[in-house]
Amino acid sequence: MQMSNKVKVVPCSGIGKVFGLVAREAVLKAVLELCPEKSETVCLAYLVTGDEEVKEMMSGSVCITVDGCPKMCASKNVSLSGGIVVDEVKVLDTVKDYKGKKFGSATELSDDGYLVADEIAAKIEQRIHEIL
C-alpha cells in the first residue's frame, strides 16, 4: 500500500445526530472542494473495526478530526489507529455562536446547518495549509 502525504481529515460517524451530519458535510467540503490536492478523508467505521489496510494507511499520518459531540470518537479512534491528531475540531465550539438557530435533522441540514458546516470547512482548510 502506498503512503499518502496528504492530511487525513476524519469526521465522527454521528449517525442519527444533526451535529454528526454537520461534521461529515464540513469534512466533505474541505476535502473534496477546498483542498482536494492536500487532504483526504477516511471512514471512521474502518478505524473502529480495525481494518488492517486503513490502519496501515493511518499509522504515522498527520490527521485532523471533526467531532459532533463531546465523546470525541473520531479523535480517540484516530489516535488508537496510529494517526497523529494535530487538531481536534469540535462542532459544538462553532454552533455555540449560532444560539437559537435550527441546524436541520440527522438526515438533512437547514441553511443554518450548512452555514456552520461551511464555517468549519473553512477552518479545516486553513489548518491544512498551516500544517503543510
Image (tube, rainbow, N blue to C red):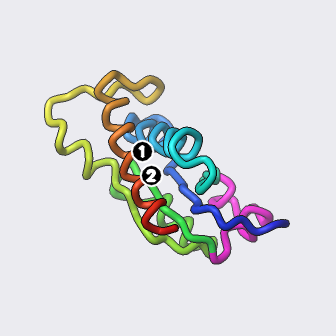
Which residue appears at 33% of the width and 57% of the height?
70
Whole-percent x, y for residue 15 in the image:
50, 39
* x then y, percent, for residue 19: 37, 40
- Describe the element under mark 2 as helix, strand or loop: helix
Type of the residue with mark 1: Ala
Q: In the image as oriented, which residue stretches furthest toward the right?
A: 1
Stretch in magenta = 45-60
For image coordinates 51% across by 43% down, the residue present is 34
C-beta proximity under 8 Å, tags 2 and 1: yes
**Above or below 121: residue 85:** below
Figure label count? 2
Say whether residue 88 is left or right of residue 43.
left
Q: Position of residue 38 (x, y in %)?
A: 59, 56
Q: Main secondary structure of the magenta part?
A: helix
**Quadrant containing the N terminus in the rendered view:** bottom right
Q: Depth check: 107 or 96 in front? A: 96
Callout 1: SS: helix
Q: Is residue 130 magenta?
A: no
| Residue on which disc 1 sits | 121
Q: Please name the residue shown 37% across and 30% down the image.
A: 114
The foreground one among 51 and 60 is 60
**Front tag of 2 and 1:** 2
| Amino acid bearing label 2 | Glu
Q: Is residue 109 left or right of residue 49?
A: left
Against 73, residue 102 (above or below) is above
| Alpha carbon distance from label 2 to label 1 | 6 Å
Q: Which mark is residue 49?
A: none
Residue at label 2?
125
Query: Residue 65 location, x and y as percent?
Result: 47, 59
Label 2 Cα crowd, 10 Å radius (few <14 / some 14-19 / many 20+): many
Q: Residue at x 48, y 62 (%)?
A: 64
50 part of magenta stretch? yes
